[in-house]
Image: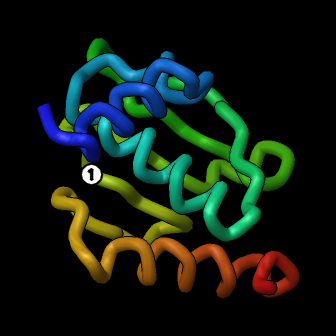
Amino acid sequence: MNTKHILRKLLLQESSITRAADTNEQEEALATVEEWAKKHNIIIRLGTKIGRYPQTVILDIKYQDNAIYIRPDGSIKVFGTEISSYIDDDAEELFLNAIYAKYPETKK
Protein backbone atom coordinates (compact mmCIF):
# COMPACT_ATOMS: atom_id res chain seq x y z
CA MET A 1 0.00 0.00 0.00
CA ASN A 2 1.56 3.31 -1.04
CA THR A 3 1.53 6.55 0.96
CA LYS A 4 -1.06 8.24 -1.26
CA HIS A 5 -3.45 5.32 -0.75
CA ILE A 6 -2.95 5.42 3.04
CA LEU A 7 -3.55 9.19 3.16
CA ARG A 8 -6.72 8.79 1.06
CA LYS A 9 -8.01 6.13 3.47
CA LEU A 10 -7.40 8.46 6.43
CA LEU A 11 -9.23 11.28 4.64
CA LEU A 12 -12.20 9.00 3.99
CA GLN A 13 -12.34 7.99 7.65
CA GLU A 14 -12.29 11.61 8.86
CA SER A 15 -14.87 12.95 6.42
CA SER A 16 -18.44 13.52 7.48
CA ILE A 17 -19.57 13.94 3.89
CA THR A 18 -18.21 10.62 2.62
CA ARG A 19 -20.45 8.79 5.09
CA ALA A 20 -23.35 9.62 2.78
CA ALA A 21 -21.89 7.47 -0.01
CA ASP A 22 -23.70 4.34 -1.14
CA THR A 23 -20.95 3.04 -3.47
CA ASN A 24 -17.15 2.99 -3.48
CA GLU A 25 -17.06 5.21 -6.58
CA GLN A 26 -19.32 7.73 -4.89
CA GLU A 27 -17.21 7.69 -1.74
CA GLU A 28 -14.08 8.40 -3.79
CA ALA A 29 -15.79 11.26 -5.67
CA LEU A 30 -17.11 12.77 -2.43
CA ALA A 31 -13.64 12.65 -0.87
CA THR A 32 -12.15 14.30 -3.97
CA VAL A 33 -14.76 17.09 -4.01
CA GLU A 34 -14.24 17.66 -0.30
CA GLU A 35 -10.47 17.80 -0.83
CA TRP A 36 -10.83 20.38 -3.64
CA ALA A 37 -13.20 22.49 -1.56
CA LYS A 38 -10.89 22.51 1.47
CA LYS A 39 -7.91 23.36 -0.72
CA HIS A 40 -9.71 26.46 -2.05
CA ASN A 41 -11.52 27.44 1.19
CA ILE A 42 -14.97 26.60 -0.16
CA ILE A 43 -17.38 25.35 2.48
CA ILE A 44 -19.63 22.53 1.34
CA ARG A 45 -22.42 20.93 3.31
CA LEU A 46 -24.29 17.68 2.95
CA GLY A 47 -27.66 18.55 1.48
CA THR A 48 -29.72 15.46 0.81
CA LYS A 49 -29.92 12.22 -1.15
CA ILE A 50 -32.35 11.52 -3.96
CA GLY A 51 -33.45 8.55 -6.04
CA ARG A 52 -33.63 4.86 -5.42
CA TYR A 53 -30.78 2.98 -3.81
CA PRO A 54 -27.99 3.65 -4.59
CA GLN A 55 -28.88 7.32 -4.29
CA THR A 56 -27.42 10.51 -5.70
CA VAL A 57 -25.83 12.71 -3.02
CA ILE A 58 -26.49 16.44 -3.25
CA LEU A 59 -24.13 18.93 -1.60
CA ASP A 60 -24.81 22.60 -0.90
CA ILE A 61 -22.50 25.60 -0.86
CA LYS A 62 -25.14 28.12 0.13
CA TYR A 63 -28.49 27.35 1.75
CA GLN A 64 -30.31 24.71 -0.33
CA ASP A 65 -28.62 25.65 -3.60
CA ASN A 66 -28.13 22.02 -4.73
CA ALA A 67 -24.69 22.94 -6.00
CA ILE A 68 -23.03 19.55 -6.43
CA TYR A 69 -24.50 16.20 -7.47
CA ILE A 70 -22.49 13.02 -6.93
CA ARG A 71 -24.06 10.05 -8.69
CA PRO A 72 -23.58 6.44 -7.57
CA ASP A 73 -21.12 5.83 -10.45
CA GLY A 74 -18.89 8.62 -9.05
CA SER A 75 -19.70 11.19 -11.72
CA ILE A 76 -19.80 14.80 -10.54
CA LYS A 77 -22.08 17.61 -11.68
CA VAL A 78 -21.66 21.20 -10.41
CA PHE A 79 -24.43 23.71 -11.16
CA GLY A 80 -25.38 21.72 -14.26
CA THR A 81 -21.80 21.36 -15.52
CA GLU A 82 -20.71 17.77 -15.92
CA ILE A 83 -17.26 17.56 -14.37
CA SER A 84 -16.23 14.01 -15.06
CA SER A 85 -17.04 10.42 -14.39
CA TYR A 86 -13.28 9.96 -14.15
CA ILE A 87 -11.29 12.35 -11.98
CA ASP A 88 -8.48 13.81 -14.10
CA ASP A 89 -6.26 16.90 -14.10
CA ASP A 90 -8.91 19.14 -15.67
CA ALA A 91 -11.68 18.08 -13.28
CA GLU A 92 -10.57 20.32 -10.40
CA GLU A 93 -10.37 23.35 -12.70
CA LEU A 94 -13.85 22.64 -14.13
CA PHE A 95 -15.17 22.24 -10.57
CA LEU A 96 -13.77 25.61 -9.51
CA ASN A 97 -14.89 27.41 -12.69
CA ALA A 98 -18.47 26.20 -12.21
CA ILE A 99 -18.52 27.42 -8.59
CA TYR A 100 -16.84 30.75 -9.36
CA ALA A 101 -19.30 31.40 -12.20
CA LYS A 102 -22.19 31.10 -9.75
CA TYR A 103 -20.48 32.60 -6.69
CA PRO A 104 -17.62 34.90 -7.79
CA GLU A 105 -17.17 36.09 -4.20
CA THR A 106 -15.77 32.65 -3.26
CA LYS A 107 -12.76 33.20 -5.52
CA LYS A 108 -9.68 34.28 -3.60
Q: Is residue 69 above or below residue 93?
A: above
Q: The residue under label 1 is which amino acid type? A: Ser
Residue 54 in view (yes/no): yes
Q: Position of residue 20 (x, y in %)?
A: 49, 20
Residue drawn at x 54%, y 38% is 58
| Number of dots carrying numbers | 1
Residue 20 in view (yes/no): no
Q: Position of residue 70 (x, y in %)?
A: 39, 43
What residue does disc 1 label? 75
- Relative to 71, is 64 on the left or the right? right
Q: Residue furthest left?
A: 1
Q: Residue furthest top?
A: 53
What is the quadrant of residue 108 in the picture?
bottom right
Q: Which SS class for mark 1?
A: loop
Q: Position of residue 26 (x, y in %)?
A: 30, 34
Which part of the image, by quadrant, shows the N terminus? top left
Of residues 81 and 1, the one nearer the viewer is 1
Q: Residues within 10 Å of mark 1 (few under 14, many from 20)?
A: some
* Colouring rule applied to residues: rainbow
Of residues 56 and 105, the one nearer the viewer is 105
Residue drawn at x 29%, y 32% is 6
Q: Is residue 39 above or below residue 76?
A: below
Q: Is residue 29 above or below residue 19?
A: below
Residue drawn at x 22%, y 71% is 88
